[in-house]
Every structure is written in C-alpha cells, then in structure tokens.
C-alpha cells in the first residue's frame, strides 16, 4: 500500500536494512516476528548484536579477555603524556576493587557521552583539561536525531501486529531538499506495543483516560500507521558533554553534564520532513492524519554522536580519520563519538563500518609488530 502510494508521488522506495536474521544464520534462528523488537531481548536470538556475533568470534580466537561488570575509571598515562593502559574499578560482594591494566594501544568505545566523559576524567599534567582536549574539542558537537512522526488512520487493517514492523523506506528526502539543510530517510515505524501506542500514537485531541481511548485502541490499533524519519542534526559546538561540578556517581567520579539545544535549522528541516511523511500517508488513503516534530531540546538519548568527531585538524576535531586521538600515537576512539554529522539514517551501521575501518588500520599497524606482543 505504501509502495503504491510512493509510486503515485514519484518516490523511490527500498527495504531498510535491519541487522536481523531473516533466515537461520550462524547457529541462530530466523526472526519469528514477535512484536517486542525495540527495547526487549529477542526470543529467537535472531536480532544481531555484539554479544552474539563479533564478541563470540573474538573469544573463540583465544585472544580476547572480557572483564564484565567492570568500569574503566580512567585512561592512564606516563608523565610525558603517553597512554599506558586503563585503571579499572569493580564491585565484588559489596567490596570495591581496583586494578590497572597496561596496554600498548587503547581503543575507547564507551558511547558518545561516556567516551567524552572518560577522556575528560583522564586529564594529566600535560593535558589538564582532559586527554586529547588541549583544543577544547572533546565533548562538543553532541548530536542525535530529531524524529518528526506522522500517524495515519485507515478504514481497514494496515498491519498484523507483527514485528519488527519496519518494511519500507524512501531515501529521496535524505539530501537536497530545497530551502533546508540535510534531511531524513522516511520509513514505516517499528510495531508498537499497546502501551507504547497509548503513549505515542493516540490522536492528540483524545484524552488518555476514560472510555474513548479504550474504544479507539480496540477498533483502530491495527488501523494506524506511523511514518517517521531521523533528521540529521546540524552539529553545534555549544551542544556538549562536560563534567558535572557537583554530582558524582557511586564511585565519586563526576557524572556527565549535557547542555545545548538542537539548531534552529534542524527544527526547520524536521517540519519539512513531517510534511513529506503526512503526504505519503495521505496518498496511501489515510482518512485522518496527525503528527508532531519534537520540541527543540538536546536529542541525545538514543543516537548520541559527535563528541570526539574525526577530522583533519585538532583545531576542530578530536581524532584523525582513523579515529586516532590527536597528539597520541596509541589512543583511538571507535564509536558514535566519531561522527562529524549523524547522517539521515539511524547510526548503528555507520558506527560498525567505522569500527571495522579502525580495526583494519590497527591490523595494518600490527603488520609491522607481532600481534602477540601487542596488547589492545
Ligand atoms: C532504545 C534504542 C533504540 C535504538 N534503535 C536503533 C535502531 O533501530 N537503529 C540504529 O541504527 N540505532 C539504534 N539505536 C542507536 C544505537 O544503539 C547506538 O547508536 C549504538 O549502540 C551506539 O554505539 P556505540 O558503540 O557508540 O556505544 P554503545 O553501544 O552505547 O556502547 C558503549 C558501551 O560502553 C560501555 N561503557 C560506557 N562507559 C564505560 C566505562 N567507563 N567502562 C566500561 N564500559 C563502559 C557501555 O556499558 C556500553 O556497553 C537505538 C538506541 C536505543 C537506546
Ligand atoms: S521481531 Fe525482533 S525481537 Fe521479535 S523475533 Fe524478530 S528480531 Fe527478535
């Protein structure tokens, strides 16, 4: 139905990649189309993550040690500033334990907020504002995606309540929209659990109490389609991760403090994308359409990125194009922090591509040094 509507609008469509086994693969089952995909463990183990893919393979090589339930407290350095390893903290039977692990190369992949926090917490005499932060770039340009969402009510059933739910996308609005910067892929959304539907998808004029919303749910849960898109946010140095001057975690380490709001241009683009989503639902025959663009606040809760952006100069970036932190030959970042912009798509595949690219670079480096003698 959406494909046909896209054709009438002159839009090209594609099937979004999902990181899910569509058939049995690697000793794990195919997706059984349960309706609990986002936010819940997968009952058939068909949803792919590091826990059932790369970590298992690396463990099988015998060359990986995993320290679970262990916190990296800080990255250690010698007096001249060279990185020497990591300091660890963990709880065991209510007792605090600490250890230091030396390493020839340290790769930080703690996510865009915690990677920035860890570098800031690892200040030393030669970098008193944080490791790799002599030009005050660590933690800046924090960004996520702004998600305009449109809902359409149809007079017939438009989905069977099967997961994961995302079936069709158009990438025609990712770039080149007249008058605005950037854009977004548009796709039908993940299947919503009834409580998520109640929270997010009821029409805006419907109360969230009383008989009316119950009746609407009973009659229309399978008659409502959502179309949404991740609008790439304009990077803004004022959006940033810093160390909180007052609040600490249970270990006494300053927590991350986030500040900033999404750029005004991001909100303008989101409004245009919302219009495109509504037009697609209308062309598909929705009898009633509603939707929203998010309030212009920092949107860094799911797709956080950009806080250690890669670039060509330490003046406006934290790492080079291999993810190597400026000023350090043996310190790397390999996570969403590297994204100069987040692009018009959900970020995981880009994060993975960059991680593999960083790994290739390290392997090339190790060609000149036996891997068995190098600790990463
Ligand atoms: C609810 C939800 C739904 C999402 N859906 C999608 C989607 O459909 N498609 C998509 O592309 N993306 C999606 N994302 C985004 C995607 O999951 C993230 O962009 C991605 O996982 C980020 O990868 P990362 O390597 O940067 O960090 P993470 O995956 O966050 O990994 C960082 C790891 O470091 C650990 N860590 C942090 N600090 C320390 C420390 N000091 N010591 C030791 N360990 C530490 C953390 O525990 C964590 O395991 C979703 C995110 C959420 C929350
Ligand atoms: S819909 Fe998602 S959670 Fe459910 S079986 Fe498929 S991959 Fe797993």
Image (cartoon, rainbow, N blue to C red):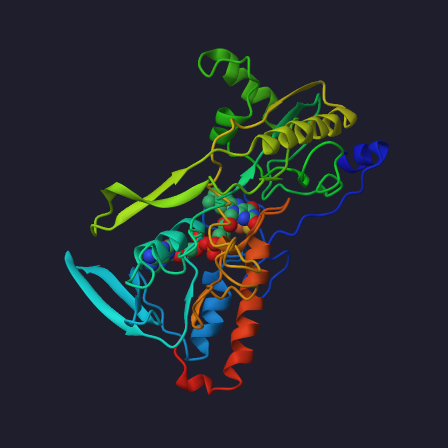
Q: Left or right: 175 with respect to 248?
A: right
Q: Quadrant of the N terminus?
A: top right
The residue located at (45%, 62%) in the rendering is 51
Report if residue 294 is visible in the image.
yes
The residue located at (29%, 42%) in the rendering is 244
The residue located at (43%, 74%) in the rendering is 59
Count of numbered tags: 0
Say if 374 sits above or below 148 in the image.
below
Residue 373 placement (x, y as % from top left):
40, 86
Front-most of 231 and 315? Answer: 315
Q: Left or right: 344 with respect to 62?
A: right
Q: Left or right: 354 with respect to 106?
A: right
Report if residue 26 is visible in the image.
no
Residue 247 placement (x, y as % from top left):
24, 41
Residue 9 placement (x, y as % from top left):
83, 32
Front-most of 120 and 58? Answer: 120
Q: Quadrant of the C terminus?
A: bottom left
Residue 306 placement (x, y as % from top left):
51, 49
Say if 291 sits above or below 69 in the image.
above
């Amino acid at each position: 139905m959406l494909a046909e509507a896209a054709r009438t609008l002159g839009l090209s469509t594609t099937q979004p990649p999902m990181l899910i086994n569509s058939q049995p693969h690697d000793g794990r089952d195919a997706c059984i189309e349960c309706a609990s995909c986002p936010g819940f463990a997968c009952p058939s183990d068909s949803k792919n993550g590091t826990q059932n893919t790369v970590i298992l393979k690396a463990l099988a090589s015998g060359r990986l040690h995993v320290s679970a339930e262990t916190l990296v407290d800080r990255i250690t350095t010698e007096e001249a500033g060279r990185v020497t390893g990591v300091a660890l903290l963990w709880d065991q039977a209510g007792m605090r334990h600490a250890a230091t692990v030396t390493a020839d190369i340290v790769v930080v992949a703690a996510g865009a907020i915690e990677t920035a926090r860890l570098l800031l917490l690892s200040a030393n005499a030669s970098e008193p504002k944080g490791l790799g932060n002599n030009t005050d770039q660590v933690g800046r340009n924090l960004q996520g995606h702004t998600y305009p969402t449109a809902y359409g009510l149809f007079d017939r059933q438009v989905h069977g309540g099967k997961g994961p739910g995302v079936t069709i996308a158009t990438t025609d609005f990712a770039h080149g929209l007249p008058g605005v910067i950037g854009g977004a892929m548009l796709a039908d959304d993940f299947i919503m659990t009834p409580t998520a539907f109640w929270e997010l998808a009821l029409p805006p004029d419907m109360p969230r109490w009383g008989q009316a919303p119950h009746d609407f749910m009973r009659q229309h849960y399978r008659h409502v389609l959502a179309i949404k898109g991740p609008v790439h946010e304009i990077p803004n140095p004022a959006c940033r991760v810093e160390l909180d001057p007052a609040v600490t975690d249970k270990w006494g380490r300053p927590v991350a403090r986030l500040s900033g709001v999404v750029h005004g241009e991001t909100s303008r683009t989101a409004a245009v994308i919302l219009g495109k989503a509504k037009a697609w639902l209308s062309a598909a025959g929705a009898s009633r359409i509603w939707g929203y663009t998010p309030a212009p606040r920092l949107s860094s809760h799911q797709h956080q990125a950009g806080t250690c952006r890669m670039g060509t100069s330490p003046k406006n970036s934290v790492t080079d194009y291999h993810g190597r932190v400026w000023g350090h030959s043996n310190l790397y970042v390999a996570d969403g922090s590297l994204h100069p912009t987040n692009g018009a798509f959900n970020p995981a595949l880009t994060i993975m591509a960059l991680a593999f690219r960083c790994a290739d670079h390290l392997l090339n480096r190790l060609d000149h040094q036996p891997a068995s003698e190098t600790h990463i």
